[in-house]
Image: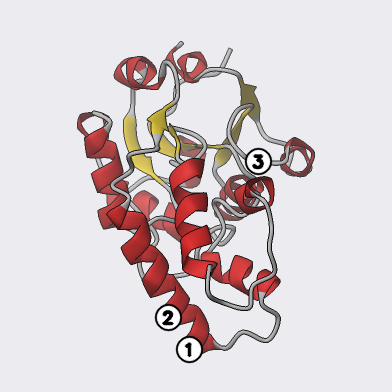
Amino acid sequence: MIPSFPVYLFDVDGTLVDSAADICGAVRETLAHTRARPVDDAYLRRYIGYHLFDLFEDLMPGVTEEEKQELLANYRVIYTGRRHTSTTLYPGVREAMARIGGRKSTATTKSTATVRTVLDIFGLLPHFDHVQGTDGFPAKPAPDVIHKSLEIFGVTPDQVLMIGDATTDMAAGRAAGVKICAVRWGYGNHEEMASYHPDYWIDDLAALAG
């Protein structure tokens, strides 16, 4: 049984919502007229949770910083324009969030403004005491987005559980010194996630509600 924690930090894409169709669609449109080598959606899903610069560098060796910034700006316009119409809430998430105690925040590679919009669309925003995205600092697997919420809540790492579906979530959690919980759905590579020895594995968010 998983004990209660004063603070829970949630990844968003692949953990709370299945957003792969919108993310991959926006990436494909962004890269349509570039020199990027062609890849399938399964390949693109592997990069969900990472900074898009990692994907750009992989698909276009030698891409410049200026090019990456331009591609990122284009992606954000295209992704926002899709209005999350192909994104869905994972089954049971809304009900579980209503039952999980403690304070809650997010730890996502999305910007704070974007993740707030996503949570609002799917009726999850009222369940969060704080919303934290990646704004002007290193993305996961760096621990910065976790540190921001710890600072806001005024808590120590031992009081926090990080929940996510990807290797980046496990790496960021370990780097921040918080407990980590791996979910068995989403887009992550379970073998890679297991190398971080998650404190907990769950098949349903309800497992966090006691």
Report helix, strand or loop for mark 3: loop
Residue at horizontal 32 percent and vertical 50 percent from the top: 82
Q: Is residue 93 above or below residue 62?
A: above
Q: Which residue corresponds to mark 2?
A: 70
Observer-side mark, 3 or 2, equals 2
Residue at horizontal 58 percent and vertical 34 percent from the top: 186
Give percent across and percent down for residue 125.
23, 35
Q: Earlier in the sequence, mark 3 or mark 2?
A: 2
Alpha carbons under labels 3 and 1: distance apart: 29 Å
Q: Which residue corresponds to mark 3?
A: 188
- At label 3, the amino acid type is Gly
Observer-side mark, 3 or 1, equals 1
Mark 1 Cα within 10 Å, few/some/many (few <14, many 20+)?
Answer: few
User: Does the residue at mark 1 contact the one at mark 2 (Cβ under 8 Å)?
Assistant: yes
Alpha carbons under labels 1 and 2: distance apart: 6 Å
- Asked if residue 201 can be seen in this view, the reply is yes
Q: Which residue corresponds to mark 1?
A: 66
Mark 3 Cα within 10 Å, few/some/many (few <14, many 20+)?
Answer: many
Residue at horizontal 43 percent and vertical 14 percent from the top: 209
Q: Earlier in the sequence, mark 3 or mark 1?
A: 1
Report helix, strand or loop for mark 2: helix
Is residue 119 toward the left or the right of residue 206 in the image?
A: left
Mark 2 Cα within 10 Å, few/some/many (few <14, many 20+)?
Answer: few
Quarter of the picture holding the N terminus: top right
